[in-house]
Amino acid sequence: MALKNVIGIDHAVVVVKDLDAAAETWKRLGFTLSPRGTHSAKMGSGNYTIMLDPDYIELLGILAETDHNVPTRNFLAQRGEGIERIAVTAIDSTAGAEEIRAKGFEPIGPIDFERPVPLPDGTISAARFRVFQWPVAEAPGGLRIFACQHKTRETVWIPELMRHVNGAKQLKQALIVTPDPAKDAAHLSRLIDRDGRPESDGAVTVASGGDRADFVFLTRDQLAARYPGVSLSGLPEHGGAGLVLASYDLAATAKALGAAAVHSGTSLVVPPAAATGTLLAFVAS
C-alpha cells in the first residue's frame, strides 16, 4: 500500500554556496525567481523558489550556522553545490509521520515553520509549512527525503512567479546517480511504498505518485549515455544529479538558454557546471 498522506514529488532542494549569486545564475537561464525568503533563526537559511505546476525548485543557502543546518553545511563541504534533498507533498504531515513510524522509520518532526512572503500587490504575507523527515541515515543514493505540507498554498504558487521565459512547466524526473541503481531504488521504494521499474539501459525508475515527477536512479555512465555531448563535470558518483523539466515550447527554451544549453537527442541540456551543480534537461511537454 502506498502511503496515504504522501502524493508525489513536491520540490527539489538545490543547496548553493552563495544564495544571491546562485539566484542570478538561474535568472540568466530564463527562470522567474521569487523574492528572497528568510527562514527562522533556528534554521539559519534563506531561499529563492522557482515555481512550476504542480511542483517547484528551491535554491537554499546558509545565512547563519546553526545546529539545525549542520547536515546541509556538511553536504556543501563534502559535495559542493547541487541537489541535497527532495520533498514529497504531504496531505497531512502529522498523519504521514505516524504512517512511516508504523512502517519502522522514526520520523523527525512534524515541525511547523514559516517565512515572510512579499506579494505582487506590495503587501507582506507568510508561507506556512508543516514538515517531517525520514531518518537522516535513510538517504537512498545519498539523497535525503522529507515531506512538506503546504498550509498556505496561495502564498507559494503565485501566478506571476509561475511564468518562465525558458518555457519551464513542471518537473518530470529527479535524477540520482549511484553505483548501484537497483539497490538504491529498492531503498527508496521501502521508504515511500512505491515499486521500482527497471529501464532498458539499467536505470531504475520509482514513481513518486499521481502525476508528479519520477525518481530515476542510474549510474554516472548511464547518465552520460542518456545525454551525449553534455559535460558532467562537478557531479558526484553518488547523489542528486539533475532534473528533467517539461517545457511549453522548446524553441522558447532554446532562445532563453542560448549558449548555456547543449542539444542532446530530443533534450536541451544545461550542464551541471552552468546551473549550480545541477544538470537541467528540458523536454517537450
Image: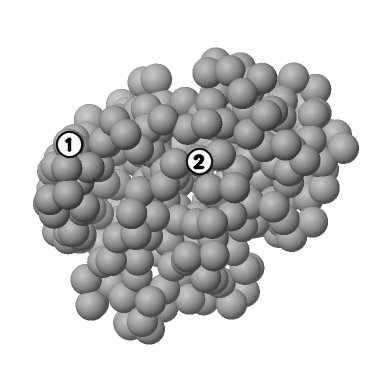
Looking at the image, residue 248 lies above or below residue 178: above
* Secondary structure state at the residue bearing disc 2: loop
What residue do we see at 47% from left, 65% from top?
Answer: 20
* Secondary structure state at the residue bearing disc 1: helix
* Circle 1 residues within 10 Å: few <14, some 14–19, many ≥20: few
Which of the 4 image quadrants contains residue 266? top right
Q: Which mark is residue 31?
A: 2
**In the visual, does 121 lie left or right of 187?**
left
What residue do we see at 25% from left, 62% from top?
Answer: 108
| Residue type, numbered disc 1 | Glu
What residue do we see at 69% from left, 28% from top?
Answer: 254
* Circle 2 residues within 10 Å: few <14, some 14–19, many ≥20: many
Number of numbered discs visible in the structure rendering: 2
C-beta proximity under 8 Å, tags 1 and 2? no
Q: Which mark is residue 154?
A: 1
Looking at the image, residue 166 lies above or below residue 105: above
